[in-house]
Image (cartoon, grey):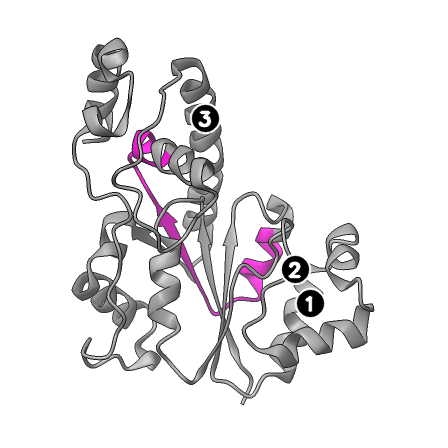
Amino acid sequence: MKSKLIVILSLARSGSSNLVKLFKNFKYIDYNEEVFNPDNQFSFNNIKNRDKLRIKYGNNYKNFIIENCLYEECLKLIIDSSNKKFIVIKILDYQVPFEQIIKIINISYKVLFLERKNILDRYISIKKANMIQEWAHVDTTNINIVFNQEDYNKFKKHHITINDKFKELLIKNKNMTYIKYKNTINPMKILSRINIIIPELKIKNIKNIICLQIQDKSKSYKKKIKNYEEFKDFIDKEIKTFN
């Protein structure tokens, strides 16, 4: 039986790590972390997958695949040789060229697109993570940032551009499904949603599911932003656009 590819597609800091924790609970899933992350070695949970790429592309397989845009071919190789029912990979927007993401979607069984509508919260989350150089499964509640309006406006423009591109793909591809960020921090909601999208997973309960984590538990922007008073009017106005 040929393995089915499930892709978690997301902008950074949009709940993808929580979704990853969910899929790691199932033995019949061959899960591979940010497999095409250019900042580190391809993170294969299954060592056999890494060895297959070494045999095919050499010890420097990561750079070879990126330089020659062999993302689709790389995944087909893993799919054809896997003995698991499902293969799950996670791709963040900056890790793979957009035209290559389209090709990956075409060979996927399901694509789960995560969206975080509150751009301000995503901006703050990225700034906090960059300060401590930690991006997953860490509590950032007590960390605050210095807000820069010009920097934020550039970030927002980029976010909207990328998000709109993904939404266009969502309309065109029946195998691509939208998931709200807020559902990724609610075990019951996310499990219910995944059950509908991929009924073959047959998720019956959440007794043994690892609890999902909210990294920033603070609901006050005064605590998140050091210079909040300076930008209070702008921030208050911005928040209203996401509600």
Reading the chain from its start, which is encountered first: label 1 or label 3? 1
Instruction: Give residue 97's position: percent from left, percent from top.
Output: 63, 45
Q: Residues within 10 Å of mark 1 (few under 14, many from 20)?
A: some
Disc number lying in front (2 or 1): 2
Compared to 57, does 142 lie above or below? above
The circle on residue 155 is 3
Rendering quarter of residue 103:
bottom right
Which labelled disc corresponds to residue 142?
none
Q: Which residue is mark 2?
A: 41
Magenta segment includes 174:
no
* Kind of element beneath mark 1: helix
Residue placed under numbered mark 1 in the picture: 74
Image vertical order of residue 143 relative to residue 177, above or below: above
Q: Is residue 206 left or right of residue 17?
A: left
Q: What span is in magenta?
A: 101-122
Instruction: Residue 93: give x, y in percent of width and height.
Output: 52, 45
Measuring from the top left, give residue 11's x and y in whole percent: 45, 44
User: For the residues marked 2 and 3, what is the alpha-carbon distance in whole angstroms?
Assistant: 27 Å
Q: Is residue 109 magenta?
A: yes
- Mark 1 and mark 3: Cα distance apart in space: 31 Å
Gap in angstroms between the C-alphas marked 2 and 1: 15 Å
| Residue drawn at the location 52% of the way across and 55% of the way down | 91
Which circle, 2 or 3, is nearer the viewer?
A: 2
Between 111 and 208, the residue placed more toward the observer is 208
- Residue visible at 21% across and 68% down in the picture: 192
Given the image, on which type of amino acid does mark 3 rest? Phe
Comparing 113 with 186, the one in front is 186
Taking the spot 36% from the left edge, 38% from the top edge, the residue there is: 125
Q: Secondary structure at mark 2?
A: loop
List x then y, in percent, for residue 176: 42, 58
